[in-house]
Image (spheres, rainbow, N blue to C red):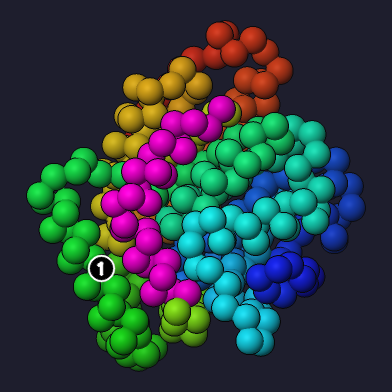
């Protein structure tokens, strides 16, 4: 566990190579967090992957142990969050050589996508978890407007989620499968203590039409294998959006794309079924390794997997 000073903040991060130096020779995975949550929720997955991969997690501005410098107000935008993550990538030398997997969850999928484009020469693969797109019509416009209002209400009343029964209701929207008391407490504590300005900004830009259009274009432009992964019982973000993202990328690019649907999981597959989620990541990473070693035309274009 370390701190790193950049132009935006004093960033808290973990790097498993600090405890196990031999991991510096292994492929690296950078995990990008979702909305209003610190990096603590990646811990079980990191433990499952560490023997084979160098795992890096970090707290974004406004969350966890990262400290925003006094008197400084960083921009809470995709580019701003990508800038701070990029500074960590370069600080750790992850931009050297093709040895980097990037995994983005929820809002973090948007930031991860921006990083994938910035470091395309270093990228082995991208994984986008529960961060989809939707057809533009009157119904989705109404849904996005409603979600924007829900964000405002949630932020103004968020302290109520610290007490029962609201705490349990909050967790049930995030996870279909029991994630245990430790991580239920983590999810609620992170949400209720995150920086209000940052959390509001992230919630709003995540549903902005122009931002979503740019995100769609950028996912298509990733020139390495992409895994789209989703829990089909997700009550936080409609899971159909991730399926639509997969279909859109499959149609628009010949670079391999894979869709994994966990039919009985929710918004937090890394906690709800760590073992099976880790297994799918390893399969994706192994495919990406071969993809970059072989002629690209030898690789299958797409695959869709349903996991009961």
* Residue 177 drawn at (x, y percent): 37, 61
In the displayed structure, 86 sits above or below 128; it is below
How packed mark 1 is, by other alpha carbons closer than 10 Å (few <14, some 14-19, many 20 or more), is some
Looking at the image, which residue is at 63% across and 57% down? 83
Q: Nearest the camera: 232 or 223?
A: 223
Magenta highlight on residue 199: yes
Helix, strand or loop status at disc 1: helix
User: In the image, residue 272 lies at what x, y percent?
Assistant: 44, 58
The dominant secondary structure in magenta is helix
Residue 165 in percent (x, y) is at 28, 86
Q: Nearer the viewer, residue 63 or 162?
A: 63
User: Which image quarter is the C terminus in?
Assistant: top left
Image location (x, y in percent) of residue 87: 72, 57
Q: In this view, does 137 lie to the left or right of 70?
A: left
How many badges with numbers are in the image?
Answer: 1
- Identify the residue shown where x is 65% and y is 61%: 84
Residue at image position (41%, 36%) is 217
Q: Give the range drawn in magenta.
A: 198-223
Check disc 1 and report the residue beneath it.
148
Q: Nearer the viewer, residue 152 or 273?
A: 152
Using the rendered image of the protein, determine whether residue 301 is visible from the camera's viewpoint: yes
* Residue drawn where x is 22% and y is 59% of the image: 144
The picture quadrant where one finds residue 99 is: top right
Residue furthest to the right in view is 21
The reply to whether residue 260 is visible in this rendering is: no
């Amino acid at each position: 566990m370390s701190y790193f000073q950049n132009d935006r903040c004093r960033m808290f991060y973990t790097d498993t190579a600090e405890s196990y130096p031999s991991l510096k020779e292994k492929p690296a995975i950078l995990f990008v967090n979702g909305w209003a949550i610190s990096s603590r929720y990646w811990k079980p997955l990191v433990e499952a992957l560490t023997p084979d991969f160098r795992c890096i997690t970090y707290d974004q501005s406004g969350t966890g142990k990262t400290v925003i410098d006094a008197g400084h107000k960083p921009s809470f935008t995709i580019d701003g969050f990508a800038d701070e993550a990029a500074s960590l990538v370069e600080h750790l030398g992850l931009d050297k050589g093709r040895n980097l997997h990037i995994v983005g969850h929820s809002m973090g999928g948007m930031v991860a996508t921006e990083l994938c484009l910035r470091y395309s020469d270093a990228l082995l693969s991208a994984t986008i978890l529960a961060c989809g797109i939707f057809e533009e019509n009157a119904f989705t416009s109404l849904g996005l407007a409603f979600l924007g209002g829900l964000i405002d209400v949630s932020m103004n009343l968020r302290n109520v989620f610290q007490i029962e029964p609201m705490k349990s209701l909050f967790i049930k929207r995030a996870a279909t499968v029991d994630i245990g008391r430790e991580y239920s407490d983590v999810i609620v504590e992170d949400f209720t203590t995150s920086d209000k300005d940052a959390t509001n900004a992230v919630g709003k830009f995540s549903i902005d039409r122009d931002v979503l259009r740019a995100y769609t274009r950028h996912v298509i432009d990733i020139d390495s294998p992409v895994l789209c992964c989703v829990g089909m019982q997700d009550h936080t973000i409609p899971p159909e959006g991730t399926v639509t993202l997969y279909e859109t990328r499959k149609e628009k690019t010949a670079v391999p794309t894979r869709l994994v649907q966990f039919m009985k999981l929710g918004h937090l597959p890394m906690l709800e079924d760590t073992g099976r989620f880790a297994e799918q990541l390893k399969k994706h990473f192994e495919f990406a390794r071969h993809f970059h070693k072989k002629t690209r035309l030898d690789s299958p274009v797409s695959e869709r997997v349903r996991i009961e």
